Image: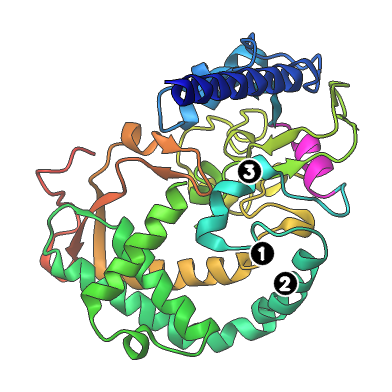
Amino acid sequence: MGVLVACCAAVGYALVGLLAFCAWLWMNRPRTDIPGPHPLPLLGNVLYFRKLPVLLEHFRELHRRYGDVFRFYAGPKLIVVVTRPEDAKRLLVGVKMRGRDTYAVTPLLPFTGNGLITSRGNIWKEHRRLIEPTFHSELMKDFMQQFNEGAEFVCKNLAAAAGTEYDITRMLIHATLAVVTASIFGKKMDEIEPDVNKQAEVADVFIEALKLMQETLRLYPAIPNPPVSTEEDIQLEGTGYVIPRDSLVLVSLILLHRRPDNFPDPDKFDPGRFLEGGSARSLPPGSYLPFGAGSRKCVGGRYAFLEMKTVLAAVLRRFRVFPGSSREELEQVELSVSGSPVTGFRIICIPRSDQPANSVPHAVNT
């Protein structure tokens, strides 16, 4: 009995100590006059995001309520969200070397290790120096064979769906892994793992890890909220707000790209914006950053653009594409490392030789 009492007392002291430490962190949290929801002691605003996953709509609601710069607390951690072009440029380009905040990178470490996404300081510099030459624009033409093979893989899978509704998420990840493996590492996935089903299982692992044409990337940027760790106080232009040091800043590209002052009718999918004479041809600096900017800009941005164009050209030559997912479903974007709809991307592909140009499948609500 005495041992039990002693154990209970030890646990009690530990809990009191933990509570005291949390209270100390809360009392010493970074303070700012940036508007945002009222935080609860110790918890901050975590209850606002109690319904998981956190979706784009959560941020859009805070944006509507508090303006172009807003903040919330995850416990004692101050998180500031910016959506103005000048602020995005100031934070992504104006700071010579941006670190990674522990809150942002810790969940990724089991999947990525201390790689280019999560590393900082000299480790990041060395990794970036080694990787960057691989994606030089002069070398992109050497990857065209692999891009075309990836496009062929996509088209075969779409043809196999035989005009039925098909969630392409898993297949596109599979194709991307195959292209990256062949072009960057010089090994085809068939050489590493001949079993196509096992290759697909690897794609599933990557999809789970990620869950932690120019207009498409405007509406759905690959990295919707690149994080910036502030190592000093930073004053924002225009608003005059000061972001305290040791804060986490999210440069919300997904909100930045939907500003009506730069993109009229911003929720409308309109590729004509980027054609000659379109509204997106003369934007203020920092208004359109599909792969980020500055020293932490996605090193594979050019590679990704060329691969997307190659695959898209192959698909559109062979198929007429109709939506399976509704626009409302596509807007349910999960705000994680990469933004993707929680219900996936569902489409219907009809071979062009089998379908009249003015015919739409009856099952599709367009």
The 10 Å Cα crowd at callout 2, few under 14, some 14 to 19, many 20 or more, is some
Q: Is mark 3 on a helix, strand or loop?
A: helix
On the question of residue 72 being in view, the answer is no
Where on the picture, by quarter, is residue 269? top left
State which region is magenta: 83-93
The reply to whether the magenta stretch includes residue 304 is no
Where on the picture, by quarter, is residue 257? top right
Task: Indicate which disc residue 94 carries.
Answer: none
Task: Using the image as rendered, state which of residue 112 and residue 252 is in the foreground.
Answer: 112
The 10 Å Cα crowd at callout 1, few under 14, some 14 to 19, many 20 or more, is some
Residue 144: x percent and y percent? Answer: 49, 84
Residue 30: x percent and y percent? Answer: 80, 23
Query: How far separated are the C-alphas under marks 2 and 3?
Result: 19 Å
Residue 276: x percent and y percent? Answer: 62, 54
Q: Residue at x 41, y 61 (%)?
A: 206
Q: Which residue is drawn at 80% across and 50% down?
A: 98
Task: Using the image as rendered, state which of residue 224 and residue 211 is in the foreground.
Answer: 211
Q: Dots 1 and 2: beta carbons under 8 Å?
A: yes
Q: Name the residue under label 1.
A: 116
Task: Using the image as rendered, state which of residue 281 and residue 30 is in the foreground.
Answer: 30
On the question of residue 199 being in view, the answer is yes
From this view, report whether residue 191 is shown above or below residue 346.
below
Q: Name the residue under label 2.
A: 127
